[in-house]
Every structure is written in structure tokens, then in C-alpha cells.
Image (cartoon, rainbow, N blue to C red):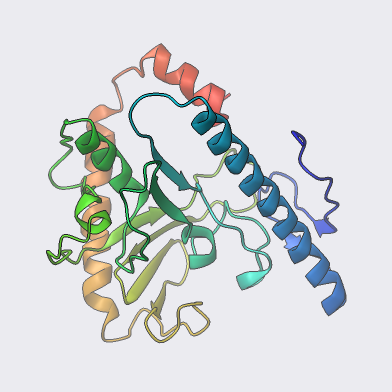
């Protein structure tokens, strides 16, 4: 029960590339790949269940707040991509986020508001009676407790930032820098270099129809995204000479982000 199922993917992978293109010749072959992915997802669900049941069986004092999420989605051939590292379409960015209190104090409900992983830190901080502050022009994480408790206050609209993973080395075949900014109803994807994309998520949630960077609604979102990038790059330049604490580097190595 502690080992993931064996899954054989038939894929074609370029040297140095994290993402692959599904090489399936028939609909049946593609569906087998989807079934294999579903099997792995089911395995992960069962491990969460085992952890939950094991912890609850200890009957520890107090209650437990469970936060279940994922760090990325998967392409599964959408937009021609099987994986998740080289593109930031919705199939890579839209992930589950479940909050559950072990004592049943949080009533079951579905929240449709646009939220992000940057909201988890202020949410957990508030749970512990603390507060989080970040760079006022960049950090926009918010505590999710007003949504979780259904307190009725309007959730202020905002645009959320995303970035594709940086190229890992000079041999990476895809050196393009890709950034995105999205609201609840629209998304602008900036390619450097390359042709930008703009999607009406309300009418086209799967991003099948690129309306183009010259679409009337795209101008404001692009300007906001470029302003965000200017601020981020300025912060990075100012911090470029500061050494990264070794304990942070150890954590990044453990997570596999640096070697």
C-alpha cells in the first residue's frame, strides 16, 4: 500500500526538456495515458486518507486544520503539452485546494473566488494569531478565512501572477520567458521572446481561442503585468549581491529545486 502503481508512459522527450509530447496514435492510447494519470491521483488520495485516519486515531487534544492542495496540474496533451513545467495554461495552474477542520467546525461549501497559493501563508499565520507582511507593491497574499467562514464580506478583485519555470541550463531547448496575469475572467500570457496570448476565461475556460494581444480587453492586463515585472526585476537586481542563507539552500536542495 505504500508504493505508487507502475505506469508506463509512451512519450517523446527532447534532451534537457522537462515536458514531453504524448506520442499516442489512437484515441484508445491517449485514454490509457489519462487512466494512468487518474490511477496515480487515486493513489495520492489514498495516502492522504491513510495519514488522516492515522492522525485522528491518536486522539490528540484540540483540532486539526487540514490543507490539501497540489503544486501544479498536468498538461495531458492540452495545448500539445503532456507535463507541467514549460507552460502556464490553466491545466498547469488550476489545482485543488481543500480546507477541512477535524472537528467538523467548517461547513462543507464550494468557493468560486479566485485564490492562489500565496494566500496560504497569511491564512495559516492568522490561524496561529500572527500576521504576514511583504513588499507592498508585490506581495498580495490574503488570508482565506473570510471565504472559509463565509463571512459575507465581498472578496476584492485582483489579478494573480504566474511564471513558467526558468530554463535550467544552456541546453534547454525552450529558453522562452513566460509570464501570466489573470483575473477571474481574463488571462494575458507574455512571451519573451514570442507572440503574446490573451484569453477570455469566462467564455473560454480551457483557453482554446487566443484572442490576441491586440484585443481591446488585453491592453490593461498587459500594462499591469509589465509593471509587475518591472518591480520584480528591480527587487532582484537590488538583492543580487546578497548571499542566500545556507539553511535556505539546504531546504531548496531537499526539495529538488537546486543541485
**Residue placed at 70% from the left, 59% from the top?**
38
Residue 168, picture quadrant = top right
Q: Is residue 137 left or right of residue 200?
A: left
**Residue placed at 85% from the left, 58% from the top?**
10
Judge by depth and name the residue closer to the eye, 29 or 2: 2
Judge by depth and name the residue closer to the eye, 52 or 156: 52
| Residue 124 at x, y percent in the picture | 28, 37
| Residue 151 at x, y percent in the picture | 16, 60
**Residue placed at 77% from the left, 53% from the top?**
13
Q: Is residue 32 left or right of residue 236?
A: right
Quadrant of the image for the N terminus?
Answer: top right
Residue 221, picture quadrant = bottom left
| Residue 37 at x, y percent in the picture | 72, 57
Q: Is residue 60 left or right of residue 256?
A: left
User: Which residue, as the protein is rendered here, is positioned at the far top?
Assistant: 246
Judge by depth and name the residue closer to the eye, 219 or 32: 32
Q: Residue 203: tell me if it is visible.
A: yes
Amino acid at each position: 500500500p505504500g508504493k505508487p502503481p507502475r505506469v508506463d508512459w509512451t512519450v517523446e522527450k527532447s534532451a534537457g526538456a522537462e515536458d514531453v509530447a504524448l506520442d499516442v496514435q489512437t484515441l484508445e492510447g491517449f485514454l490509457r495515458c489519462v487512466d494512468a494519470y487518474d490511477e496515480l491521483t487515486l493513489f495520492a488520495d489514498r495516502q492522504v486518507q491513510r495519514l488522516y485516519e492515522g492522525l485522528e486515531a491518536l486522539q490528540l487534544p484540540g483540532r486539526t486544520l487540514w490543507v490539501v492542495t497540489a503544486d501544479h496540474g498536468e498538461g495531458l496533451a492540452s495545448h500539445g503539452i503532456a507535463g507541467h513545467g514549460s507552460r502556464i495554461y490553466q491545466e498547469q495552474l488550476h489545482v485543488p485546494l481543500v480546507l477541512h477542520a477535524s472537528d467538523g467546525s467548517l461547513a462543507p461549501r464550494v468557493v468560486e473566488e479566485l485564490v492562489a497559493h500565496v494566500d496560504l501563508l497569511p491564512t495559516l499565520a492568522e490561524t496561529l494569531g500572527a500576521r504576514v507582511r511583504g513588499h507592498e507593491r508585490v506581495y498580495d497574499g490574503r488570508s482565506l478565512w473570510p471565504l472559509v467562514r463565509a463571512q459575507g464580506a465581498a472578496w476584492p478583485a485582483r489579478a494573480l501572477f504566474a511564471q513558467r519555470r526558468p530554463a535550467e541550463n544552456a541546453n534547454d531547448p525552450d529558453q522562452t520567458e513566460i509570464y501570466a496575469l489573470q483575473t477571474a475572467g481574463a488571462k494575458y500570457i507574455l512571451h519573451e521572446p514570442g507572440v503574446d496570448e490573451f484569453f477570455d476565461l469566462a467564455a473560454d475556460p480551457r483557453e482554446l481561442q487566443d484572442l490576441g494581444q491586440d484585443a481591446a480587453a488585453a491592453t490593461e492586463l498587459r500594462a499591469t503585468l509589465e509593471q509587475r515585472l518591472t518591480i520584480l526585476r528591480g527587487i532582484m537586481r537590488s538583492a543580487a549581491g546578497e548571499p542566500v542563507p545556507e539553511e535556505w539552500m539546504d531546504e531548496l536542495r531537499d526539495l529538488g529545486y537546486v543541485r
